[in-house]
Amino acid sequence: MKAKPMKRTIAYYPGCSLEGLAEEYDRSTRAVCRALGLELVEIPDWNCCGSTPAHSYNPLLSAALAGRNLALAEEAGLDTVMTPCPGCLKALKGALHKQGEDPNGFQDALGRPFEGKVRAVSVLQLLAERIGPEALRKAVRRPFRDAPVAPYYGCLLTRPAAFAQFDDPENPVSMDRILEAIGCAVPDFPFKTECCGATYGVTRNPIVTRLTGRILDMAVRAGAAAVAVACPLCQQNLDLRQAQVEKAAGRRFRLPVVYITQLVGLALGLTPEEVGLDKLFVSPESLIMNLDAESETADSLSNAG
Amino acid sequence: MKNGQNLLRIQESRDAGFVERVERESGQRVSQCYQCGNCSASCAYTHVYDFPANQIMRLIQLGQKDVILRSRSIWLCAQCQACTTRCPCNIDVARVMETLRVLAVEAGAVTQKDIQLFYDEFLKSVAAFGRVFETGLLASYNMKSGKPMTDADLAPQVLRKGKLALLPHRIRGRKEVAAIVRRFMDGAPERG
Ligand code: SF4
Ligand code: SF4
């Protein structure tokens, strides 16, 4: 019998946001993975992870909704599920945790077979660990010429530490390293993990305008020309709601808020169109002007991972 | 609340079994909290809470079930995990807040009805289509919350970017998903 080849194929869970307001995060994630030789297989017929509402009813409801997607991935013979959304990631990891904590309750709520032999990671973790800053640096074709970009991680990517098992909960650096690898200058940004106001944009808008306003203000004070994000909810609050923030704060920011996958994609030589740059609300044009002309020296990434 | 102070007659309103109930449901040793205040210092939502996180912990220890389940704080907690990350007693404070929300729903003591409505509409959307349909969710929330203009200012830009979905995406397994949701939404689930 032949030895099993190492699995490079990764189950992809986009999550509902990436079908709607965060479609450019979906597009850029797929494009970057393709460019880096990571094969994504979208989980067939995936469903919503339940997000915060499911948790507020019962952690088992959240675990079962998220668990169905893990079970579908397992059924497809895949052992790693990647989702770009930290909220979805929390639900997927929560399901695995719940299965360990209350196997019967979980199985009952889920109602389909699931052994639990999958792990869940974020796209940021994939870029930081499977590819790594060094390999990424070598693959860059159009580096950003020292454009100052503030790395904003948000609440959930690295917290709580025991759960996330990735990077540092207080001072994460994975995105810093990726930004440096693609030629950005990374300013000291003390609000890396401050909360943006989460889902309260709809129900309690002043919370979001206040918290997001503080983050934008700090980014400006840190000298950033743009903010890099890895969460569709953070992005929505900082970008789509930036006009609401400006109105509440009585000042103008017009600070581009760009997904890390979009920035990586551009540096790899993908076109603005291929990473969905036109879908951002605050125009990132000033940032794009910082991109270097295509260089011919980039290595192929075929040996990475 | 009177003159900015919360006055409680704690002996009269004490529910002796509450600490254990919360500890059992959350799996957290709330009784070990020694009021260092790290959770509240880390919390970006204290300015909208009626009781800061550390006071919620203390109120649990004092068995103040009704006050807690009716508090605004448990509904405004964003589950950002800052408190959990910094508690020196390793109490997962965010998990406790979440447990309190579940208990408030179960007890019919939800005070922040609009937030609960948003969550209800969200789950109904998931049950109907298998995935949440953002446009439909906002429309039904606006109608039922009596705040019809919520986020109306955003519509033109969303439309301009071609991001306004007018039709939901229905997955094939939506019956299975609906069955999962229904088990937890209609009537309280079985619990130990
Ligand atoms: S999880 Fe909730 S209580 Fe804890 S810091 Fe965040 S918002 Fe505050
Ligand atoms: S951080 Fe922990 S010990 Fe300190 S007040 Fe909060 S719950 Fe209690």
Image (cartoon, coloured by chain):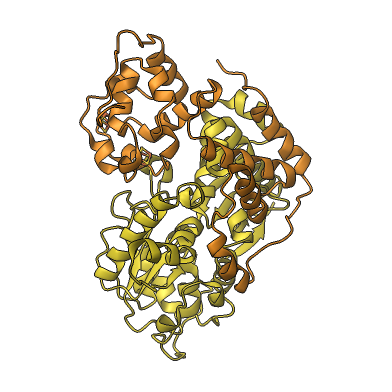
Chain colours: A yellow, B orange
The quarter of the displayed image where residue B58 is located: top left
The one of A56 and B157 positioned closer to us in this rendering = B157
Placement of the C terminus of chain B among the 4 image quadrants: top right
**Residue A132 seen in the figure:** no
- The front one of B31 and A124 is B31
Which residue is found at the position 20% from the left and 31% from the top?
A: B36
Q: Relative to B131, is B60 on the left or the right? A: left
| B59 horizontally vs A1: left or right | left
Q: Is residue B111 visible?
A: yes
Count of marks, rendered view? 0
**Residue A262 horizontal/vertical position (percent):** 50, 72
Residue nearer the viewer, A216 or A23: A216
Image position, residue B186 (x, y; %): 68, 27
> Quadrant of the rendered structure where residue B17 is?
top left
Nearest the camera: B116 or B25? B116
Q: Position of residue A2 (x, y in %)?
A: 67, 55
Q: Which residue in the rendered view is the most extreme toward the left?
A: B36
Q: Compared to A280, does B81 lie above or below?
A: above
Q: Residue at x 40, y 18 (%)?
A: B65
**Quadrant of image for the N terminus of chain B:** top left
Residue A240 sits above or below residue A115 on the image:
below
Instruction: State the residue at coordinates (62%, 22%).
Output: B189
Q: Quadrant of ligand 2?
A: top left
User: Would residue A22 appear left or right of A186 to someone viewing this image?
Assistant: right
Q: Residue at x 55, y 77 (%)?
A: A278
Horizontally, residue A190 falls left or right of residue B165, namely left
